[in-house]
Amino acid sequence: MRRNQKDRWESYVQVSDESVCSFLREHLGAKEKAGKSCLIVGKGFDPRMLEGLKVLRGALDPEQISIIMLVFNEGPTSPSRGYDELVRKNVDAMRQMVPGGEIQERNINMFSSEGRRITSRSAESAFRSVSELQRFRDIFVDVSSLPRSIYFPVLAKLLHLLDGVKEATPPNLFVLVSENAELDRRIMEEGIDERCGLHSPVSRSS
């Protein structure tokens, strides 16, 4: 039995700026009672990759945070490989903030073996079972360093899986975003999707 759409959004909240930190502290309550939370982020060069984690660290102990890092696989010739050093620094900083054993990577394949773009389908299949989600009290998807072609199908799949929870309370699902208009202006898209008017997932330069 699927959850009623009205029930899904009955506890909907939206907060911004400084209210985010105070809301999370109130929602999570005492750290020793907060349980485990999952943070889903994109592995990339964007410095905003770490912003959601920094906010959660203000409300949770590092051991209470499990991270699923989505890795964009565009192949060895991707222009984004020029930013590998920035990516490495982001990942190193993340590993300083939470135990290494709490970080796992999941690949998002951008192209099929025939060279066709399969980004959205690959992103959707990164999460297959609700059982892997039910151990968490809260799931946070930080879209700050994720392209639309990835975070839309990921969010849709998570909602689908959580709607299927029948005999227990499903985890809360939150979307985090850190806006920086100046940084977005400096990021320029490259690649085949640009000519088609679509969002290029990772082939970007500043």
Image: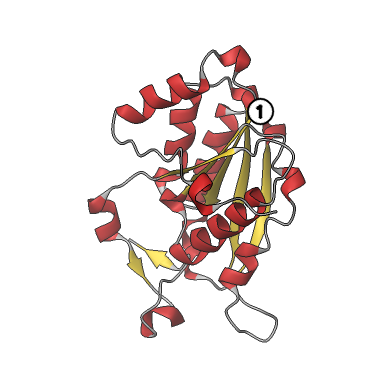
Question: Is residue 99 depicted above or below 124 in this figure?
Answer: above
Question: Is residue 44 depicted above or below 51 in this figure?
Answer: below
Left or right placement of residue 34 versus residue 196 in this view? right
Residue nearer the viewer, 43 or 139: 139
Q: What percent of the width, then of the height, locates residue 90?
A: 50, 42
The residue depicted at 75 percent of the width and 52 percent of the height is 129
| Residue, disc 1 | 99
Q: What percent of the width, then of the height, locates residue 91?
A: 56, 42
Question: Is residue 116 depicted above or below 188 in this figure?
Answer: below
Give the secondary structure at mark 1.
loop
Residue nearer the viewer, 202 or 40: 40
Left or right placement of residue 154 versus residue 161 in this view? left
Question: Is residue 203 depicted above or below 195 in this figure?
Answer: above
The residue depicted at 44 percent of the width and 63 percent of the height is 148
Q: What percent of the width, then of the height, locates residue 81?
A: 52, 63
How crowded pointer 1 is (Cα within 10 Å; few <14, some 14-19, many 20+) is rated as some
Residue nearer the viewer, 142 or 195: 142
Q: What percent of the width, then of the height, locates residue 137?
A: 62, 31
The residue depicted at 67 percent of the width and 79 percent of the height is 112
Left or right placement of residue 12 versus residue 169 in this view? left
Query: Residue 121 lies in what quarter of the image?
Result: bottom right
> Can residue 46 be seen by looking at this rendering?
yes
Query: Residue 147 lies in what quarter of the image?
Result: bottom left
